């Protein structure tokens, strides 16, 4: 049986942040699938926004602009 890989706190924080961004994208008119696909396709951009200190709401507004 494969050993479960433990994620570090920073990775977990980024995943949580992306989950919150997804919610704001959906509120902005995207479907859940569209929001998830967009985050996956633009993961490096979202990672930059995360490290630049944008809130999930700010990042979603930028993504929808």
Image: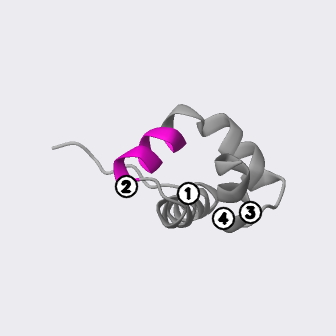
Label 1 packing within 10 angstroms: few (<14), some (14-19), many (20+): many
Q: Secondary structure at mark 3?
A: helix
Residue at the (52%, 32%) spot, across then down: 41
State the separation of the CA atoms marked 4 and 3. 6 Å
**Circle 4/circle 3 CB separation < 8 Å:** yes
Q: Secondary structure at mark 1?
A: helix
1 or 3: mark nearer the eye = 3
Label 4 packing within 10 angstroms: few (<14), some (14-19), many (20+): many
Which residue matches tag 3? 58
Q: Tell me: 60 left or right of 53.
A: left
**Circle 4/circle 1 CB separation < 8 Å:** yes
Which quadrant would residue 46 be assigned to in this image? top right
Which residue matches tag 1? 18
Percent of width and height locating residue 47? 68, 45
Magenta segment's dominant SS is helix
Comes first in the chain, label 2 or label 1: 1
Compared with residue 44, is residue 59 higher up or lower down, i.e. above or below?
Answer: below
Q: Which disc, if any, is residue 56? A: 4
Percent of width and height locating residue 45? 70, 38
Which residue matches tag 2? 32
State the separation of the CA atoms marked 1 and 3. 12 Å
Residue at the (66%, 64%) spot, across then down: 56
Comes first in the chain, label 4 or label 1: 1
Q: Give the residues drawn in magenta, as a range.
A: 31-39
């Amino acid at each position: 049986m494969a050993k479960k890989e433990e994620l570090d706190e920073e990775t977990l924080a980024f995943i949580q942040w992306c989950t919150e961004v997804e919610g704001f994208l959906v509120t902005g008119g995207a479907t859940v699938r569209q929001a998830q696909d967009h985050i996956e396709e633009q993961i490096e951009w979202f990672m930059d926004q995360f490290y630049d200190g944008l809130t999930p709401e700010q990042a979603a507004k930028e993504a929808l602009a």
